Structures are given as C-alpha cells and as structure tokens.
Amino acid sequence: MLDKDDHLGKNAWTELLPGETEAVHKFNKSYLDFLNQSKTEREAIENIYRTARDKGFISIDECQDLKPGQKIVIREKGKICALIVMGQDPIENGINIVASHIDSPRLDLKVRPLYEEDGLALLKTHYYGGIKKYQWLAIPLAMHGVVVKKDGHMVNIVMGEKTEEPVLTISDLLPHLAKEQMEKKMSEAISGESLNALAGSIPLDKEGKDLVKNHVLQRLKDQYEIEEEDFTSAELELVPAFPAREVGLDRSMVGGYGQDDRVSAYASLQGVLEVKDPAKTVLCLFVDKEEIGSVGNTGLHSLVIENIVTEIMHLAGKTNYLDIRRCLARSCALSADVNAAVDPNYPDVFEKRNCSFLTRGVVVTKFTGSRGKSESSDANPEFLGRIRKLFEDEKVSWQVGELGKVDIGGGGTVAQYMAYYGMEVVDCGVAVMGMHSPFEIVSKVDVYMSYKAYRAFMQSF
Ligand code: MN
Ligand code: MN
C-alpha cells in the first residue's frame, strides 16, 4: 500500500469496494450510539456483555462442554469482558487474541470530595490518565459511576446526559485576571488541586455551618439515597457531558470523548460477533486501567489472560501446566489501540514518513515506547509479514505509524503484557487527532477498516 514516492499512502475512501461507502457510514452511526452509551469502563463492559448475550454468547458457568463454534462470554468485576469463539484447532496450539481497553482519561471524584468554600459547594477530583488539564475547564461535565452502600447495595448514577438534567463544571479563570497565570508554563498554569467541580449554591437553612454543602447532601439523599460517608466506597467519574458527533461538512469523521480506546473496543466487538467457525480459538478481550499503566486487578498487567485461558482449557479438559503455557506462547495477538494522527496544526512533533494519518486506514504500529523504544513491545518482522499479507488479501486499507518524532514524547499500550507470555503481538488501531482530549477525532473510514482488520485477524489461521 505504501507507494515508494508517497509516504502519505492512499486515502482509504478511494479504496472502498462497491457498497462499502454506505457500510462505512452505517457502521459509524452505530459506533456513535455505542460511544454515547459507554462513557465509563463499567458502561462499556455492560454494553459489550449485553450485546454478546443477545448474539448468542453464553456465560462460562452455563457451558457444559466445548465444541468448535461454541461462543462464551466471561465478565469480571464489571470492568473486564472476554468473548471467546472456540476454534477447530486444538487450543494448546494457540489462539487469536484481540485486546482493547475500555477506560479513558477523566476526572475521578476523591473519596472525600464534597466541601464548601465561599458559599459554594464543590467536589474535589483526582484526574485519571494523561490529560491536559486546561481542556477540562469550562465545559459541561456529567457524573457517571457507582456508589456501594455498607450493605453491598450498589447505586448507579448517571447525571448530566439528558438536557433536562443538571451538569457539573470546573470554572476557568477570567482572562482579565489571568495575567500571571498566562505567563506560567502550560504544565503549571492549572494545578491538579484546582480541578474542583461546582456542585451547588443554595443553603439548607438560614443559619449554620456548611449549609450549601448540606443542601447538596440532602439532594443526594433524596435522589440516590446516599450519605456523605458512602463516597468512600464509590467510583464516580466526571466525563464530558456532550454527545459524540459527526465532524466535517462531509460528515467523514467522528468527534467524541473516550474514543481511545472504545473505538477499538467497538470495532473488535463487531468483528467477533461475525466470526463463524474459526480455525483458531478467538479471544476478544476488553480490559480496564490501560491509561494508568494496566495495573490493578482489572488491568492487563495482571493474570487475567492466563486465568481466562486456563478456565477455557479446563472446560476443554486440558488443565496440565504444559498445555496452558503452550497455548499462551503459541498465540497471536493484536493490541487493539489507537495511535496519534498527524495534525496539520502541529506538524513539528510528527515525523511524516513514519507517523499515521487520518483516512489512511488502520494503523499497524511496530513499536511504541519513548526514549529509545523504552517500555515497548517491538513486533517481530516474521509476524508483521503475516499481518501485511492478511490485510492485503482481505482488502483492509492500512498504514504504518510511529507515535510522534523520536524523543519528543511517547507512550505505551497493553502489547507488552501479552508479549510477556511469548505470544506474537503488534499494535493495531485507528489514528486519533486530539487524543485524550474531551473531543477526540477519528476518520470514519479508518474505524471501518479497523473492524475489517480485527475480523480478518480473528478468522485467520
Ligand atoms: Mn489507548
Ligand atoms: Mn490513551
């Protein structure tokens, strides 16, 4: 696909097969719905799980014996989901894995968030993932999440998505008084501790202390039956309150929050739903906590893949240690995650001969990392050769991608945590402009090509 004289490659809109242009727009319409209904990791997993059940995946607990073609779903802690389609080939020969992450940068409420200052009630936050703090000021924020009461009862909260519901917001300093602030370094102009969201201004009574805060607490009690102490066992996230939208006069792009990496989650979900009688067993995996290093018991830097594979092999009657190790080591994986698209407004940070562009198809990223590929899983060329052939055979428009210029920054994905087992893995996902912002941009045709890529990979032998 890469022409010798043209590092930009071909625009994937021009490479579509007959009928595919309509398919691209239709696919992205459903994708927009998914984005708007999946603004947190829990919501994404709930939607993925429900879709899988509707499409005939059965829970592993209901599964008696495994035959080729059997579809199984595993959900863990409300933040991990695994969709499995059993293949013809013995499982110890390895499986095909596509793994994406469903967490995105946001503002988490602290465990003791609510306080009163200057006659106003505010909620303290601690940001999650890599954000440019200024992007989260002066925009409407919705509050999503769960509160768990002492008796284990879970209260689900979604506030600020419907136009009749209130939103929260973090104020920005007026330019008139921002002379000192504007002279500061961008990284220092807004402190983490100033990311406090406005939550109320009506006092509960005429006289007393913390009356505005107490009024907010009363509203929380009336509406959700939660008390102040309940915040300590809660997971409440502030996310942009506006919906994802089509972008451009030609409607060719999608703008919205959380596309890193729910775009890969959605595309791989649609891919696995279409997998029929695969040669290899397929594992389509959705994990949490990538944005903070894949740590914790819902991130991929845990034993989750190993546990899922062991459960499946147990059902298949193959629980000996050697079979499990062989299955993992002989597997192949796509780390389904996004790369940075060259931004014409900021050309200086991109090395255009190796970076990825909007509309040039799904991006195959050989390595990520920073400062000399640190923390990267550098894909083996033997595996990349197979991926090239597969994508060309299956008419998947694709491009190469590197995350910006050497030494300008960098980043990582879940690839290294799969490579750990010895399996072949490469990063593969769409290019995103304005990654980690409240309104990330992707190209519709790239989204469609990523779905074709994941589906083709899952069916491959
Ligand atoms: Mn990502
Ligand atoms: Mn990210």
Image (cartoon, grey):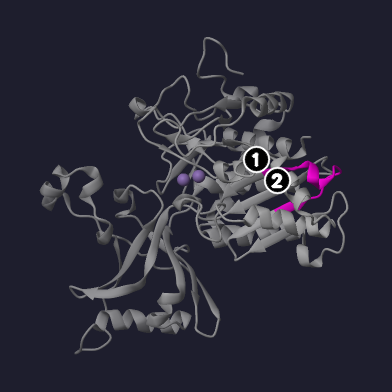
Give the residue type at disc 2: Leu
Quarter of the image for the C terminus: give it.
Answer: top right
Q: Quadrant of residue 384?
A: top right
Which structural element holds mark 1? Answer: loop
Q: Dot 1 corresponds to which residue?
A: 422
- Depth check: give the residue in front, 398 or 213: 398
Q: Where residue 48 appears, x then y in whole percent?
A: 65, 56
Q: Where residue 458 appears, x then y in whole percent?
A: 73, 40
Quarter of the image for the N terminus: give it.
Answer: top right
Q: Where residue 145 appears, x then y in whole percent?
A: 49, 67
Point 64% across, 23% down: residue? 15
Residue 274 in sight:
no
The answer to whether marks 1 and 2 mark residues whose Cβ atoms lie closer than 8 Å is: yes
Residue 152 in sight:
yes
* Left or right relative to 303: residue 293: left
Magenta range: 83-97
Point 55% across, 45% down: residue? 414
Tell me if residue 269 is in the magenta stretch. no
Instruction: Answer few, some or many: residues within 10 Å of disc 2's Cα (few below 14, many 20 plus, some between 14 and 19).
Output: many
* Left or right relative to 312: residue 398: left
How far apart marks 1 and 2 lie (CA) works out to 7 Å
Tell me if residue 93 is in the magenta stretch. yes
Give the residue type at disc 1: Gly
The circle drawn on residue 328 is 2
